[in-house]
Amino acid sequence: DTVLTQSPALAVSPGERVTISCRASESVSTGMHWYQQKPGQQPKLLIYGASNLESGVPARFSGSGSGTDFTLTIDPVEADDTATYFCQQSWNDFTFGSGTKLEIK
Amino acid sequence: QVQLKESGPGLVQPSQTLSLTCTVSGFSLTSYSVHWVRQHSGKSLEWMGRMWSDGDTSYNSAFTSRLSISRDTSKSQVFLKMNSLQTEDTGTYYCAREVLYYYDGYAYWYFDFWGPGTMVTVSS
């Protein structure tokens, strides 16, 4: 299985720039996607194909990377961005990262 | 608009079979594939399996021996059946719609719409 590794938690202040990383155990090309999940809700798609912004998602969100290293950037962060962010690869079946919990101070 | 909604028993006894239904609207099951994904409380997401738009299925090898996914296109429903449930199967079960994306000659899949999820507790 392709293992995706994310840092467990981050805390930033509103207006700051935050980067959330995801490292794959093997190359997934650009088959990496990002989701936001708020407590008690289902995941919501933010970025697909490593860098493509899903329709309706604010332009404050962006994604980059290819191969094994990927980044989700939120700039500037807003209070409403408090959530857990998951990466997901679809190069080798489907696996998800363990999630990064983002706290807005 | 596109919607998916899971339904199921909520509580299942150990060793019994879990049966869940995903009812979709706003799209056709013959045009889109639908997946099942589960989440243990507060933890990561785990892909379980897929009902392809052509009626074929594929499964996570961790579940192959006890998982079955089927559908009724006339009712716009996708079903999950998993037997030999254990307490470790407690969690929230989601169905999600798949989108196919091509880049540089390769196909990738991601999930653009998810149901709200249904909580399943395995306990006696």
Image (cartoon, grey):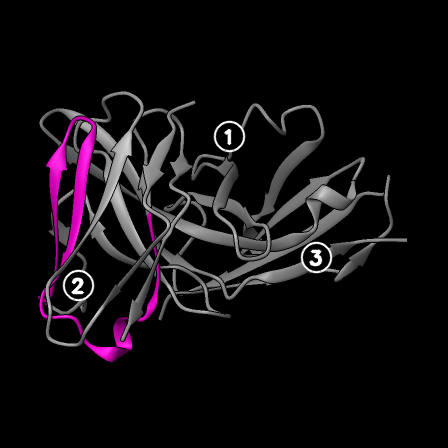
Residue B11 percent location from the top left of the image: 80, 59
The residue that disc 2 covers is: A55
Q: Which residues are magenta?
A: A59-86
Asked whether disc 3 touches disc 2, contact meaning CB atoms under 8 Å apart, the reply is: no
**Mark 1: few/some/many CA within 10 Å (<14, 14-19, 20+):** few
Q: Is residue B26 left or right of residue B104?
A: right
Subunit that carries the residue with mark 2: A
Q: Are marks 1 and 3 in contact (CB under 8 Å)?
A: no
Going by the numbered disc 2, the residue's amino acid type is Ser
Looking at the image, residue A21 lies above or below residue B5: above
Q: Are marks 3 and 2 on the same chain?
A: no
The residue labelled by disc 3 is B120
Which element is circle 1 on?
loop
Q: Amino acid at mark 3?
A: Val
- Inspect the magenta stretch and tell me whether residue B91 lies in it: no
Asked if residue B25 lies left or right of residue A24, the reply is right
Label 2: few (<14), some (14–19) or many (≥20) C-alpha neighbours in 10 Å: few
- Amino acid type of disc 1? Asp
**In which image quadrant can residue B41 be found?**
bottom right
Who's the residue at 74% across and 62% down the image? B10
Q: Which residue is mark 1?
A: B56
Question: Mark 3 against mark 2, which lies toward the viewer?
Answer: 3
Separation (CA) of disc 3 from disc 2: 32 Å
The 10 Å Cα crowd at callout 3, few under 14, some 14 to 19, many 20 or more, is many
Q: Chain of mark 3?
A: B
